[in-house]
Amino acid sequence: MLIPFFNRIFKSEHIAELLRGGVYAVVFKTLSFFSGLLITSIMVRHYGIQSYGVYVLFVGFWGIGAFAGRFSLDTAVNKYIAIHHSVGRFSLIKPILQKAIKLSIVFSVLAALCIFVLATPIATYFFKDASLSMSIRIFCWFIIPIATGMILQSGLRALKKVKSYTFSTFASSNLLMLLLISGSVFFSNQFFTPVWIAAFASVLVWLMAQVLWMKNSKYVSAQKLPDGDATKLIQSAWPVFFSSIWVVISHYAPLLLLGYFTDVIQVGLFEGAFRLSKLIIIGLFLVNTVAATKFTELLHKEDKDELHRLLQHKAIIVSGIAVVVFVFSLLIPDFLLRLLNDQFAIGRSAFIILGLAQLVNALVGSVNILMIMAGYEKQLMRLNMFGTLSSVVLSFILIPSMQMEGAAIARSIGIVLVNISCCIFIYRKTGLLTFWWPFLKKKGTKVPLQV
């Protein structure tokens, strides 16, 4: 019912399909977001802000390890399967995913071993507590289910099983965490309980992804992966991986340096402000759910006019939502932060700074996804490197004197530089506008899209 409705409005089946997937994404992302607020509030009230800061740092190291473990194979799987899907080669979907999971297990073990070996300096310099080194060595192995679960979720996305993908990716983790953390307050007040709960929830999410994949792929036939296709998968993944390295550094460097120069309390407050600022890009979640698949499909068909129309319709939707949410956030920042806990009101300035960066992120559009799907991964890697180095240098300069606000400025400048640079690059190379501006018309494509 949703596709015909959106089709009548935009006169495009592609934007209609994009929005249909977005409806599920927004529903489950909204559940995830408010679950996250409740989780933060419960942790801070029952276990204390210091416990929450330790939890955030553990989740941060899991995120870094899982990133290395999946080696951007989730993005490669989505792109590679979408190409086969567009030409009807459905029997290659399962073997591609299976190969990606096997590779991910190898990379995940290597990432866990690195953290295992570095546990003592990590505990000493980031957690400021050398006694946590043994806990770090125990919890580092949860990187494996987190990373392989992401590969399975990407397989659901590539199959266009939007409801299963969005629930598994956006909602399942936080809903499980909320259920477990709510129950834990009656049985435990131990400092480390939130970390144990997060580790257990990651395994449950992995099991859920397994069940959803088996349920949604049981009617998909499989054949042996042709010789050379596994190599193509790696070749498609590695430029995205090295590009994403800079994104991960850009996200975690201010967070970890804030822990290094200040304490875990500042880390918790900053992370709360950053998560809340992502309300402004809720529109991107609306359209990005199936954007990669749609971009690949239209690029593979070389239908650039329809792709440009899709980008413009998407930009109108995302920009409108972002402006409204940003203005609303400016009016009541203290109220929004206090939804987490009264202590988070200290992060008001950081929240506003990060909100401005997220507004730019939303207005510019899905530039990262488009560059990857169009074959400009190496160029994206260079632009991400430029933005990340700027963010890291500013973090070293600003955090010692400005603390949380310094981290917010450093992180925000990195976000803005990368997004604007990608937007300019795409326009100059392809003539496609990823943002909405009625006075600037598209130009003829000078350079072919490299799919």
Image: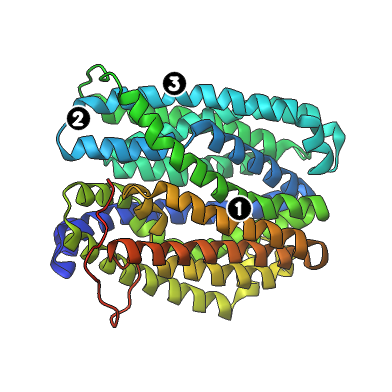
- Left or right? Give the position of 219 relative to 129: left
Which structural element holds mark 1? helix
Kindly identify the amino acid type of the residue bearing the numbered disc 2: Phe
Q: Residue at x 36, y 30 (%)?
A: 233
Q: Amino acid at mark 3?
A: Lys
Label 2: which secondary element: helix
Mark 1 Cα within 10 Å, few/some/many (few <14, many 20+)? many
> What number is the disc on residue 23?
none
Classify 10 Å Cα crowding around label 2: few (below 14), some (14-19), many (20 and above): some
Name the amino acid, label 1.
Answer: His
Q: Answer yes or no: is residue 196 visible.
A: yes
The reply, left or right, for residue 384 in relation to residue 394 is: left
Of residues 136 and 237, the one drawn nearer to the viewer in this rendering: 237
Q: Circle 1 sits on which residue?
A: 251
Q: Residue furthest front?
A: 446
Please state the horizontal and vertical placement of residue 121, each as a whole percent of the image.
Answer: 81, 35
On the question of residue 159 being in view, the answer is no
Q: Quadrant of the C terminus?
A: top left
Q: Is residue 439 above or below residue 259?
A: below
Badge 3: residue crowd in 10 Å (few <14, some 14–19, many ≥20) = few
Q: Is residue 6 above or below residue 301?
A: below
Give the alpha-carbon distance from disc 3 to disc 1, as whole Å: 27 Å
Place of residue 159 in the rendered image (x, y in percent of width and height, measured from the top left)? 27, 37
- Image vertical order of residue 240 relative to residue 41, above or below: above
Instruction: Tell me which numbered mark, 3 or 2, is placed earlier along the sequence.
Output: 2
Residue hosting label 2: 90
**276 left or right of 232 in image:** right
Q: Which residue is disc 3 drawn over?
A: 102
Q: Earlier in the sequence, mark 3 or mark 1?
A: 3
Residue lying at the far bottom of the rendered structure: 439
Mark 1 or 2 closer to N-term? 2
